[in-house]
Amino acid sequence: MRLTTKGRFAVTAMLDLAMHGGKRPVTLAGISQRQRISLSYLEQLFGKLRRRTLVESVRGPGGGYTLARSIEKLSVADIIAAVDEPLDATQCGGKENCHEEQRCMTHDLWAKLNDKMHEYLDSVKLSDLVAQQATRKEKVKVLQDRRGREAAAV
């Protein structure tokens, strides 16, 4: 079981869009540069995100992408599902044919893990990730200010 690059990049790109969006659309080129994600890969991801109505595209000069929903309503699970990223700890994709076309002894364990993963990812909203980043930036700024004062005192 693992979350692949597709899901990770989709969440990262949506977080970047949430942080840099607002009054005007955000370009994929900007996200690509800030997050070091291939522009062509972002185009594929945002095509899927747009089809699932998580983002809206704005054409023309000054165009780009905006969020189609509020960050309080967008969950990490929504984003991962939009890019067709399966999160499945079972070996059978839930078909219960894990062991020689039979249900394996640990099927329930892995199926419950799937439920817990989905429950957790659905509980994490894009607004939570934005808030975490804001807190992280504030902590970095405080550390930099302290270091600057200590260097000036020397």
Image (cartoon, rainbow, N blue to C red):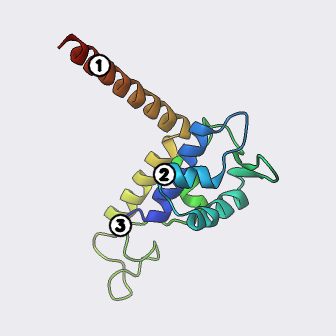
Q: Which structural element holds mark 2?
A: helix
Q: Residue furthest top?
A: 153
Amino acid type, residue under disc 2 in the picture: Gln
Measured in 3D between alpha carbons, the distance from the residue under mark 1 to the one under mark 3, in whole angstroms, is 45 Å
Instruction: Give the percent coordinates (x, y) of residue 107.
Output: 34, 70
Q: Nearer the viewer, mark 2 or mark 3?
A: 2
Instruction: Give the percent coordinates (x, y) of residue 98.
Output: 36, 80
Q: Which mark is residue 35?
A: 2
Instruction: Give the percent coordinates (x, y) of residue 33.
Output: 53, 53
Q: Dot 3: within a 10 Å radius of its alpha carbon, few (fewer than 14), some, or many (20 or more) residues?
A: few
Mark 1 and 3 residues: CB-CB less than 8 Å, in contact? no
Quadrant containing the N terminus in the rendered view = bottom left
Measured in 3D between alpha carbons, the distance from the residue under mark 2 to the one under mark 1, in whole angstroms, is 28 Å
Total residue callouts: 3
Sequence-first disc among 2 and 1: 2
Sequence-first disc among 1 and 3: 3
Q: Which structural element holds mark 3?
A: loop
Q: Which mark is residue 148?
A: 1
Q: Residue furthest right?
A: 60
From what the image shows, is residue 147 above or below residue 15? above
Q: At x 31% / y 77%, what residue is drawn?
A: 104
Q: Nearer the viewer, residue 42 or 95?
A: 42
Sequence-first disc among 2 and 3: 3
Q: Which structural element holds mark 1?
A: helix
* Residue 18 location, quadrant: top right
Residue 77 appears in the rendering: no
Mark 2 and 1 residues: CB-CB less than 8 Å, in contact? no
Q: Residue furthest bottom?
A: 100
* Residue at the spot of label 3: 1
Measured in 3D between alpha carbons, the distance from the residue under mark 2 to the one under mark 3, in whole angstroms, is 25 Å
Q: Nearer the viewer, residue 150 or 154?
A: 154
Amino acid type, residue under disc 3 in the picture: Met
